[in-house]
Amino acid sequence: MTLEAGRRVRLTADLGIGEAFTQEPGEPGAGAVVGFLSLGAGAEGTVERVDGELPESEEAREYQRLKALFEDYGHTMPEASRERLEAQIAALEPEWAAHRARGSRVTVRVRLDNGFVLDGVHQDVLAAV
């Protein structure tokens, strides 16, 4: 899923926020722990900002270009050309794998309908509405 500002999303997992403390009126500091605060799966909100998108490297773009070329026209290429293209693709596969691993680290800022704001939340715990 590609997230963009303005898109409606829903939490797909419960998010633990922290412990809940008692607060006595007029006393500074937190009191006793009385529970745990979390946001439940299903809470909906709007994406305000997308952070952490890593741009593709030249090698990753070249891998995509060559892979598409191979898939579309590889069956029509002379054997030597096809083998050379396969070798070029194989040489770029480590860079492509590294890009895919880095690319999964997209985080967003979401303003939930209940007023909470989640900043730096990983895209994997959100689904489009």
Image: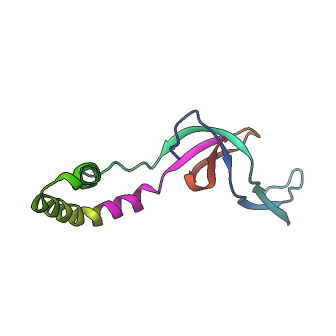
Q: What residue lies at 20% left-to-right and 63% top-to-bottom?
A: 86
Report if residue 103 lies within the magenta region.
yes
Out of 119 and 32, give the one closest to the viewer. Answer: 119
Q: Going by the image, does 22 lie left or right of 128?
A: right
Q: How is the image coloured?
A: rainbow
From the top left corner, tell me how far across and down residue 78 is, in percent. 12, 57
Any part of residue 9 in sight: yes
Image height of 25 relative to 110, above or below? below
Out of 17 and 104, give the one closest to the viewer. Answer: 104
From the top left corner, tell me how far across and down residue 128 is, in percent. 62, 43
From the top left corner, tell me how far across and down residue 87 is, in percent. 18, 65
Q: What residue lies at 59% left-to-right and 36% top-to-bottom?
A: 7
Out of 80 and 106, give the one closest to the viewer. Answer: 80
Kindly indicate the quadrant of the structure image that contains residue 59: bottom left
Q: List the single residue furthest toward the right.
A: 25
From the top left corner, tell me how far across and down residue 2 is, in percent. 50, 44
Task: Tell me which segment is drawn in magenta.
Answer: 96-111
